[in-house]
Amino acid sequence: MQSDFLSQSINQTNQHNDTKNQMNTLKNILLALFCARPVFANVATGVHEGGITKTLETATTTRHLIGKAGSTEAEVDLCDAADLPLGVITDEGTVGEPVNIALLGAVPSTLLMVASKPISAGSSVYTAANGKVQDQPTLAGDYYHIGYALTAAASDGERLEVCPVPPRKTKVMNTFSGTTSEDIANLGAALQAAPDKIIVLP
């Protein structure tokens, strides 16, 4: 009986040691996974829900201007009329300062933008110079349609609420000359730029 008790005690001790070894092995695995290297929650690559942070390439004291991709992937710059817009820079700041960009076509809300001229509610909204926006352009050139005005802007520099859309490249052409061959050539040249939309001025 004493021999049986001794054998049972040895077995229990071995089982306890096996469990302890298994726990130590698990602990070492967890340490190797999570403590041997830093774990980052916010990395440069990945997905973003409607907004992204970049640093300013050009200083601005005005919020809600349209931004475009900067010289590097980490930067944003002010968008001009013919530039492909990235989104609305919701902050102001100095060169190199981080700002938030509400991405056109991804943000789940309306956006404030800054008018370059009077804009009526209900108008289509297009890119303009220096990060501002305008209604349908009246000069020939390349622009991007980026939304619809929900409120009006009475003058240059006034903010308006816009329902944003993904940028659509728009080619604005001068009025047709009436010479068929010339008009066909001009239209063909415009189509070669592969715009999403062509507007012919009256």
Image: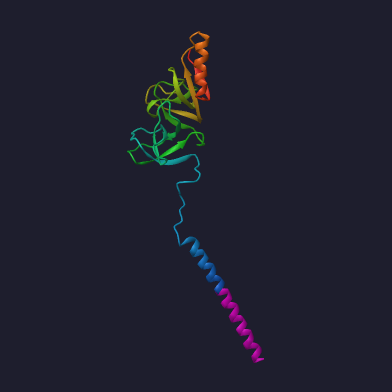
Q: Position of residue 55 (x, y in %)?
A: 38, 40
Q: Position of residue 18 (x, y in %)?
A: 58, 75
Main SS of the magenta part reads helix
Q: Position of residue 96 (x, y in %)?
A: 34, 41
Q: Residue shown at 45%/23% (left/top)?
A: 142
Q: Position of residue 34 (x, y in %)?
A: 48, 60
Most foreground residue, 152 or 79: 79
> Bounds of the magenta span?
1-20
Quarter holding residue 134: top left
Q: Residue shown at 45%/41% (left/top)?
A: 52
Most foreground residue, 137 or 37: 37
Q: Is residue 105 visible?
A: yes
Residue 124 belongs to the span the image colors magenta: no
Q: Quadrant of the N terminus?
A: bottom right
Q: Residue shown at 62%/88% (left/top)?
A: 6
Q: Is residue 151 visible?
A: no
Quarter holding residue 74: top left
Residue 13 belongs to the span the image colors magenta: yes
Quarter holding residue 140: top left
Residue that sits furthest to the top in the current view: 178
Q: Is residue 11 left or right of residue 157?
A: right
Q: Is residue 3 left or right of residue 154?
A: right
Most foreground residue, 161 or 189: 189
Q: Is residue 82 above or below residue 201?
A: below
